[in-house]
Amino acid sequence: ASDTEEPPATLMTWGESVRLTTANNPDLQSSREAVLNSDAVHRGAYSQLYPQISLSYGDTRTFTKAGLYSPSNYSTAYSEDISLSQTIFNGFATKGNIYQSKAQLNLAFANLNADKATISYNLKTAFAQLIYAQKLITVSRDVIDIQQKSARLVRLLYEGGSEDRGAMLLSQANLDQAVINLNEALRTCTLAQVQLNVAIGKQLPLPILSEGELSTDLLP
């Protein structure tokens, strides 16, 4: 294979981009961890209302030396202790902790939903821009092909004396503009691929080629 051969494209559907974003986006992962932590704190606040049981176990070993009329003796004593406690009233501290932890959990869910909306918007924007850029590249290349044929024909007519110089220069200018438009489309496509990687949260190998249509579903 040639050293200048382009690497194979990474094919990307909308569903695959959503799956990768859900698994890799750092902001989304951080928000989900915040929800899990707040939920654990909330559950812990409720645990103060439940009976608290403690169990202890121990053993004591003694040794008695032999006396004048008695042999030596080993003895072991075992003890077990179980206690049960129940909070009846502690100045509304437990109730206050429950309300506070519930509010923190609701805030964590709100932040998660807000991050989902923002990340979904960024992902959709990048994916839609990539679809647009790919179609624009195809159209731009078709336009270049048409302008090349037109410029070649006008030049032949000019050289044959049946067309003026202005028409020849105009046809060449149209071709030059078509090439500029193609280069802009290529840059737009590259930028869309970079933005898609940022939204996903993972550096996928370029080039990335979108497949299928864009959906309006939010991230799960």
Image (tube, grey):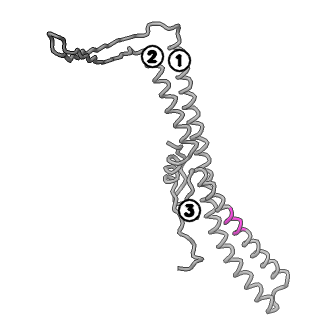
Which residue corresponds to the image point at 55% horizontal and 70% vertical from the top-left? 7
Quick one: SS at disc 3? loop
Q: Where is residue 94 in the image (x, y as percent from the top left)?
A: 50, 14
Q: Which amino acid does label 3 sit on?
A: Pro
Mark pair 1, 2: CA separation: 10 Å
Residue contact between numbered discs 1 and 2, judged by CB atoms under 8 Å:
yes
Q: Does the magenta stretch include residue 42?
A: no
Mark pair 3, 2: CA separation: 52 Å
Judge the density around disc 2: few (<14), some (14-19), many (≥20) Cα neighbours within 10 Å.
some
Of the two numbered discs 3 and 2 in the rendering, the one whose residue sits closer to the viewer: 2
Mark pair 3, 1: CA separation: 48 Å
Q: What residue type is labelled 1?
A: Asn
Identify the disc placed on residue 31: none
Judge the density around disc 3: few (<14), some (14-19), many (≥20) Cα neighbours within 10 Å.
few
User: Disc 2 designates what residue?
Assistant: 48
Of the two numbered discs 3 and 1 in the rendering, the one whose residue sits closer to the viewer: 1
Which residue corresponds to the image point at 58% horizontal and 42% vertical from the top-left? 27
Q: Where is residue 209 in the image (x, y as percent from the top left)?
A: 55, 63
Of callouts 3 and 1, which one flags the residue occurring earlier in the amino acid sequence?
1
Quick one: SS at disc 1? helix
Tell me the quarter of the picture where residue 58 sits.
top left
User: Disc 3 designates what residue?
Assistant: 205
| Drawn side of residue 50 relative to residue 219, left or right | left
User: Disc 1 designates what residue?
Assistant: 97
Question: Magenta part of the protein: which range?
Answer: 181-187
Quick one: SS at disc 2? loop
Of callouts 3 and 2, which one flags the residue occurring earlier in the amino acid sequence?
2
Where is 194 relative to 93, above or below?
below
Q: Does the magenta stretch include residue 186?
A: yes
Q: Which of 18 and 49 is in front in this view?
A: 49
